[in-house]
């Protein structure tokens, strides 16, 4: 007997009207960081949670400047983004004690970029057994915690290190 698994938060995204603008450019100028899941801001970019994560604690490091590729980043932007990536790994270790990480960037739709016009780095914490039959056979991911609860755990960790 097949039992349905519900992921109603995905439907909101699937059915939502996608605007012509860049989601990263739009969110960075708003003053609702918690609603936008922005955990931390630096001089050249910001760290935000992925609303539709591959795993609990899935973060994105995003430059403020609208650029397509890492080759367009200035030296200052590159350093700042790498420092935010380091900070993100350390904060995730403190909050969730993952056993490993996937860190990467998808440049271009053919490489898997969902939002290809604005460069962003993915940081995905990993645990033994987090890839199992659900994702492989059912194309379903089990995220054990609501993104707002994860945000509330991570925000103070990111921002106490100032």
Image: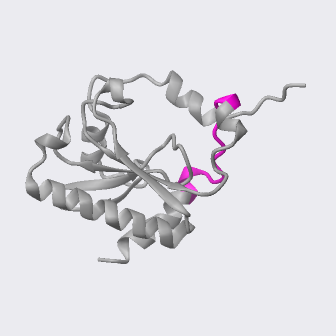
Q: x%, y% of residue 47?
A: 34, 55
Query: Viewer-proximal residue, 47 or 124?
Result: 124
| Residue found farthest to the right | 1
Quadrant of the frame with the N terminus: top right
Query: Viewer-proximal residue, 115 or 101?
Result: 101
Give me the residue at 38% from left, 63% from top. Answer: 88
Magenta range is: 137-149
The quadrant in which residue 24 appears is top left
Q: What's the colour scheme?
A: one colour
Q: x%, y% of residue 124?
A: 47, 52
Give me the residue at 51% from left, 63% from top. Answer: 152
Horizontally, is 162 left or right of 11 in the view?
Answer: left
Quadrant of the frame with the C terminus: bottom left
Magenta residue check for 150? no
Query: Viewer-proximal residue, 155 or 1?
Result: 1
Give me the residue at 57% from left, 32% from top. Answer: 10
Give me the residue at 41% from left, 70% from top. Answer: 90
């Amino acid at each position: 007997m097949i039992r349905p698994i519900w992921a109603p938060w995905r439907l909101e995204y699937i059915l939502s009207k996608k605007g012509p603008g860049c989601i990263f450019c739009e969110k960075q100028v708003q003053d609702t960081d918690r609603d936008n899941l922005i955990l931390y801001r630096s001089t050249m970019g910001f760290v935000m949670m992925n609303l539709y994560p591959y795993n609990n604690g899935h973060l994105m490091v995003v430059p403020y400047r609208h650029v397509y590729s890492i080759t367009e980043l200035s030296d200052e932007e590159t350093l700042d983004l790498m420092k935010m990536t380091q900070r993100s790994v350390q904060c995730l270790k403190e909050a969730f004690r993952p056993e490993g990480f996937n860190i990467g960037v998808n440049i271009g739709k053919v490489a898997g970029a969902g939002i290809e016009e604005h460069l962003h780095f993915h940081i995905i914490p990993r645990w033994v057994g987090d890839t199992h039959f659900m994702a492989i056979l059912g194309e379903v991911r089990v995220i054990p915690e609501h993104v707002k609860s994860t945000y509330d755990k991570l925000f103070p960790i990111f921002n106490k290190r100032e």
